[in-house]
Amino acid sequence: MPTRPHWSLYLLSALFIGAGLLHFLHPETYLRIMPPVLPAPRLLVLLSGAAEVMGGLGLLLPATRRWAAWGLLALLLAVFPANIYMLQIHEQLHLPAWALWARLPLQPLLMWWVWRVGSNRRG
């Protein structure tokens, strides 16, 4: 008898799909936090949004779940510099530094969650 995927699979998938769609709906939000040393910021925002949507969808299918998880882990590593850059320009963004410091450790927790879901055939 097939088992149902765990609720955390659906929540994680929705998180990535939703975040990815926001890259297309509000790209200016993401453009503000792109480190200036990176080329083609608009393209990178759109590509990272597409990667989040595809990764979130990929988590839902057992056949693509492992590959989607590896892709999302790579993406989370790739966007980490933007989190650090956000902290550096927090005054321009009108965000409290403490909140951005508190956000940094969430990235490894999110990576752990992606790894757990991706390594579980059931979800």
Image (cartoon, rainbow, N blue to C red):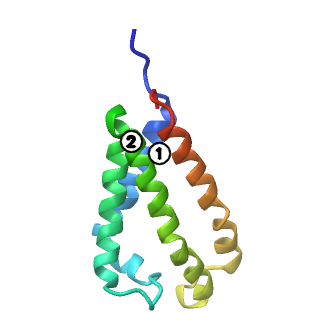
Residue identifier under label 2: 59
Between discs 1 and 2, the one toward the N terminus: 1
- Is 59 placed above or below 28 here? above
Q: What's under tag 2, amino acid-wise?
A: Leu
> For mark 2, does the 10 Å Cα neighbourhood hold few (<14), some (14 to 19), or many (20 or more) residues?
many
60 or 22: nearer the eye?
A: 60
> For mark 1, does the 10 Å Cα neighbourhood hold few (<14), some (14 to 19), or many (20 or more) residues?
some
Residue at 30% over, 69% down: 47
Q: Is residue 32 left or right of residue 83?
A: left
Residue at 60% over, 85% down: 90
- Is 11 placed above or below 37 here? above
Q: Quadrant of residue 60?
A: top left
- What is the x, y in percent for residue 74? 46, 60
Q: Is residue 29 left or right of residue 96?
A: left
The reply to whether callout 1 and callout 2 are in contact (CB within 8 Å) is yes
Q: What's under tag 1, amino acid-wise?
A: Leu
Residue at 43% over, 21% down: 4
Residue identifier under label 1: 12
Residue at 69% over, 67% down: 102
